[in-house]
Image (tube, rainbow, N blue to C red):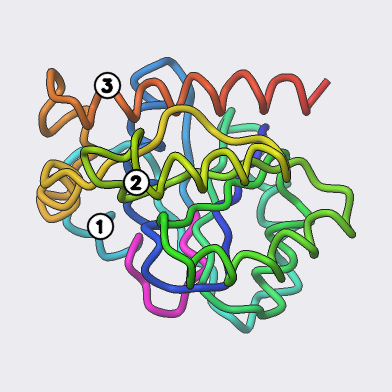
Amino acid sequence: MRVVTLVTQKGGTGKSTLATSLAVAAGQAGETVVAFDLDPQGTLAAWGNSRQAETPAVVTVPAERTGELGAVLRGVAGRFSLAILDTAGADNPITRAAMELGTLALVPLRPTRPDGLAIKPTVEALIRGGRSFGFVLNQCTPNARSSRAAEMAAGLASLGLLAEPMIHARADYQDAFAAGQGVTEYAPKGQAAAEIRELWAWVNRQAKETGK
């Protein structure tokens, strides 16, 4: 079972929204998916509770079970091909465990200076642990390719892998989340859905390569 961890020590970067839509897109592509909510705020769990479809499975791991995360993942490995871990926007024991256990870590950030500064502790921890990771430039404005986001993309690419494509700020992401859906279900022919399918294809390739 491959494990994709969404992690950055800052709130508001869109980890939960990406986690839900990636989980759905991966399932549509043939993966059997379990999504873990490791954040005390419970955003992903709330999405799971509002969802009508039975997949992906959504599991909450409370803080007191931090030391059991590895055992929990091993316990479901025979039933699922992919686990997606949604972590809190803070440095805590369960976030560190999620980074250590991941096949691939995704580090979402918006194209702003505060987000660029905030990723430093996360990236340092991933490098110290020898973990594979990629940056996801999220919530970009429509003219991102000729703006600040393009400059940040160039800088991130020099630090490590930059996931493709940039994810833009589109209403479909928030509307899908509110409906308990992934964006590829909510508006399958929309631009947001196309972005998430492309992002899943990138994640799938990287996770397969890392898992060899």
Residue tagged 2: 20
Residue 188 falls in image quadrant: top left
Residue drawn at point x = 40 percent, y = 37 percent:
23
Residue drawn at point x = 10 percent, y = 29 percent:
187
Q: Are marks 1 and 2 in contact (CB under 8 Å)?
A: yes
Q: CA distance from mark 3 to mark 2?
A: 15 Å
Can residue 51 be seen here? The reply is: no
In the rendered view, does 107 fall on the left or right side of 29?
right
What is the secondary structure assignment of the residue under circle 3? helix
Can residue 32 be seen here? The reply is: yes
Residue tagged 1: 47
Lower sequence index among marks 1 and 3: 1
Q: Are marks 1 and 3 in contact (CB under 8 Å)?
A: no
- Residue bounds of the magenta highlight: 36-44
What is the secondary structure assignment of the residue under circle 2? helix
Residue tagged 3: 194
Mark number, residue 60: none
Residue 100 falls in image quadrant: bottom right
Q: CA distance from mark 1 to mark 2?
A: 8 Å
Residue drawn at point x = 72 percent, y = 57 percent:
99
